[in-house]
Image (tube, grey):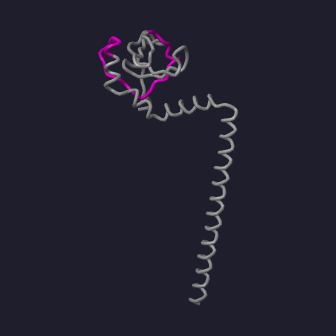
Amino acid sequence: MPFQRFVQSGRVAYVSDGPHQGKLVTIVDIIDQNRVLVDGPLSSVPRGEMRLNELHLTKFRIRFPYSGSTRVVRKAWQAANISELWKETMWAKKVEAKKKRMELSDFDRFKLRKARQIRNKLRTDAFYRLKKKSKKTKAASAESKSTKRVEKK
């Protein structure tokens, strides 16, 4: 099946644009082809309509009655433990890392650059040590094979 995430009642979505950018909401009802009714009781997003091009659908879906109230959505959200599940996803971790990078000062960026240089130097040195060791073992194995051939003749 090519599509895994559908615009449907109970689908959890990530808001990518607008005043509630970066928060999670639940689709409560579908208004038309371009708009949906959303509610984010635990992410402080009031019930209202949003355009679908402002939302990114997640893999999570909450089960609640059709057009459920905010109280019903909140209970279903807490029962499914969506906030904790979201924090464990790679998507949430990348968003958090991006946010941290945006908040770095000049000095923090300088320290990060120096730490990366040190890490890369250690990595390169380890690589060349392994490469040299590999060449020695290949040479030793080739030498032992050539002496075995001589002994057989």
In x, y percent, where is residue 92? Answer: 49, 31
Occupied quadrant, residue 83: top left
Occupied quadrant, residue 126: bottom right
Q: Residue at x 61, y 32 (%)?
A: 101
Q: Is residue 59 a member of the stretch shown in magenta?
A: yes
In x, y percent, where is residue 117? Answer: 68, 47
Q: Which is more toward the observer, 127 or 153?
A: 127
The image shows residue 129, relative to residue 29, as above or below, that is below
Q: Residue at x 58, y 89 (%)?
A: 151
Question: Horizontally, is 6 left or right of 146 in the view?
Answer: left
In x, y percent, where is residue 59? Answer: 42, 29
- Residues in magenta? 48-72
In x, y percent, where is residue 90? Answer: 48, 35
The image shows residue 52, relative to residue 118, as above or below, that is above
Question: Horizontally, is 97 left or right of 44 in the view?
Answer: right
View extreme (front): residue:
107
* Position of the C terminus by quadrant: bottom right
Occupied quadrant, residue 147: bottom right
Q: Which is more toward the observer, 89 or 151?
A: 89
Q: Is residue 99 a member of the stretch shown in magenta?
A: no
The image shows residue 153, relative to residue 8, as above or below, that is below
* Position of the N terminus by quadrant: top left
The image shows residue 105, relative to residue 138, as above or below, that is above
Q: Which is more toward the observer, 106 or 102?
A: 106
